[in-house]
Amino acid sequence: TTGGKNKQHLWYYYPNMTYDEVLLLKQWDARGGLARGLDKDCLTENADGTMVSSFTVHSAFIDPSSPENAPPRESIEVRCVAIWEEEEENEE
């Protein structure tokens, strides 16, 4: 499955990461459209104006600018779950 083309999609590329840097990808967010039972993952807006999707699409590609003798890429995937209850706002 692919994310498809959408003008709202933003793609980022980090060609100069070093061994002591980490890239964290959110895999699921309960505030997104699919997580809330909608028929598609429409972006929802937080109170601060930021947008939320249920999940993050990520991919890999062959980098044509990489030298032929470049060492192979190394990566470690770690999956964890963080669950918390949101604080209820006091209604006065």
Image (cartoon, grey):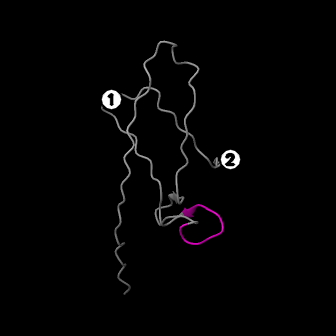
Depth check, front residue: 37 or 48: 37
When the figure is inspected, residue 20 is found, relative to residue 35, above or below; the finding is: above
* Label 1, label 2: how far apart the Cα atoms are: 31 Å
Q: Amino acid at mark 1?
A: Tyr
Q: Residue at x 40, y 45 (%)?
A: 24
Depth check, front residue: 22 or 87: 22
Q: Amino acid at mark 2?
A: Gly
Q: Position of residue 4 (x, y in %)?
A: 68, 47
Q: Position of residue 40 (x, y in %)?
A: 65, 64
Q: Give the left or right position of residue 64, taking residue 4 as reference.
A: left
Q: Residue at x 35, y 66 (%)?
A: 83
**Does residue 9 belong to the magenta stretch?**
no
Give the residues drawn in magenta, as a range. 35-44
Q: Residue at x 35, y 61 (%)?
A: 82
Magenta stretch, overall SS: loop
When the figure is inspected, residue 64 is found, relative to residue 74, above or below; the finding is: above
Q: Residue at x 47, y 61 (%)?
A: 29
Number of numbered discs visible in the structure rendering: 2
Q: Which residue is mark 2?
A: 4
Q: Quadrant of the C terminus?
A: bottom left
Q: Which residue is mark 1?
A: 19
